[in-house]
Image: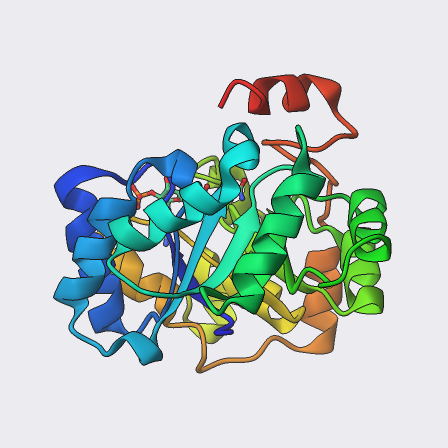
């Protein structure tokens, strides 16, 4: 799995098709979408326009919790919309509703060869350990909100212990990044390497052995976010950035019932 991918949340229509193709031309090989984003068809068109062979890509999609009772049908629909006969990674989007039934259907689809790897999203360590304990296939990935103010340091330790790869969604704070970008330490490090604040934040996460999937609809940012492999943060810089963690999720965590209530409206 590549360490950097292209996110597509809130990216629909012609913009989606254009930016997915642009991302592929830039060098992105991992594309992240979801049933709930309603853009799999446009992502599929963008992939076609990207012009690289299917084997070079790593396609990720997610089954929404509202579809857990029809997981097979949902995955078949994703395959059709994305224009592919296999998916690299399919995630259960949330630990809501009957996710055990959905997981067992994903296990079957994995064994049948339609999905190369299966994983989860928004699973806290307790849910993850439970799922691993009572099922045959272990989740390959847990995709969770992870950025400077919500670094998931504890979750990462548990994921490493169980051999589950950490994938960071909202790695730039989902557009509320101004405060993070303006942090004096981030600014100082960015100036030292002649990089932008966004590049420093993405690099920090990658150096923590975590895959990042930033989203942008702007060509210059799509290129900027990909250009993070020609510098390396020192151990001291990583430590100073780690100290800025506020353990503050914006989107969803079972520890914050009001955020769970909001996520259930999706
Ligand atoms: N599993 C889940 O529940 C879940 C939840 C949320 C997201 N995701 C996935 O994770 C991906 C990334 O998360 P996200 O889209 O929520 O948030 P994000 O990537 O952290 O932030 C995207 C926002 O940052 C802006 N941006 C992008 N690059 C920038 C740069 N270099 N400088 C300044 N601003 C920049 C974008 O604006 P412009 O587009 O205008 O450039 C957009 O408003 C999603 O697209 C989706 O694939 C998964």
Say which quarter of the image contains residue 27. bottom left
Q: Residue furthest bottom?
A: 230
Q: Which of the pair 180/187 is nearer the observer?
A: 180
- Residue name at image x 42 percent, y 42 percent: 73
> Left or right: where does residue 10 sit relative to residue 141?
left
Say which quarter of the image contains residue 149. top right
- Residue name at image x 38 percent, y 62 percent: 225
> Left or right: where does residue 36 sit relative to residue 132?
left
- Residue name at image x 52 percent, y 59 percent: 109
Q: Position of residue 189 (x, y in %)?
A: 55, 66
Q: Which of the pair 59/85 is nearer the observer?
A: 85
Q: Position of residue 203 (x, y in %)?
A: 53, 68
Q: Quadrant of ligand 1?
A: top left
- Residue name at image x 74 percent, y 72 percent: 236
Q: Which of the pair 33/221 is nearer the observer?
A: 33
* Residue 201, visible in the rendered structure: no
> Left or right: where does residue 175 sit relative to residue 82?
right
């Amino acid at each position: 799995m590549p360490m950097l991918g292209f996110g597509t949340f809130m990216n629909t229509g012609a913009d989606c098709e254009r930016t997915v193709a642009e991302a592929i031309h830039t060098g992105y090989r991992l594309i992240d979408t979801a049933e709930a984003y309603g853009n799999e068809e446009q992502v599929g068109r963008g992939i076609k326009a990207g012009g690289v062979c299917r084997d070079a890509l790593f396609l990720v999609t997610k089954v929404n919790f509202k579809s857990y009772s029809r997981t097979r049908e949902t995955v078949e629909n994703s395959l059709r919309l994305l224009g592919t006969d296999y998916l690299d990674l399919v995630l259960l989007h949330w630990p809501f509703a009957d996710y055990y039934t959905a997981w067992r259907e994903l296990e079957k689809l994995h064994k049948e060869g339609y999905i190369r790897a299966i994983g989860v999203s928004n699973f806290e360590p307790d849910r993850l350990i439970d799922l691993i304990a009572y099922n045959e296939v272990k989740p390959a990935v847990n995709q969770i909100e992870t950025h400077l103010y919500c670094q998931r340091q504890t979750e990462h330790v548990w994921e490493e212990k169980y051999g589950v790869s950490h994938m960071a969604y909202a790695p730039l704070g989902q557009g509320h990044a101004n405060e993070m970008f303006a942090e004096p330490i981030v600014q100082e490090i960015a100036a030292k390497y002649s990089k932008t604040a966004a590049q420093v934040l993405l690099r920090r996460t990658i150096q923590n052995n975590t895959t990042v999937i930033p989203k942008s609809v702007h060509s210059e940012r799509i290129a900027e976010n990909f250009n993070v492999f020609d510098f390396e943060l020192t151990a001291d810089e990583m430590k100073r950035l780690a100290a800025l963690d506020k353990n503050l999720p914006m989107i969803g965590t079972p520890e914050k019932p009001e955020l769970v209530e909001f996520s259930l409206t999706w």
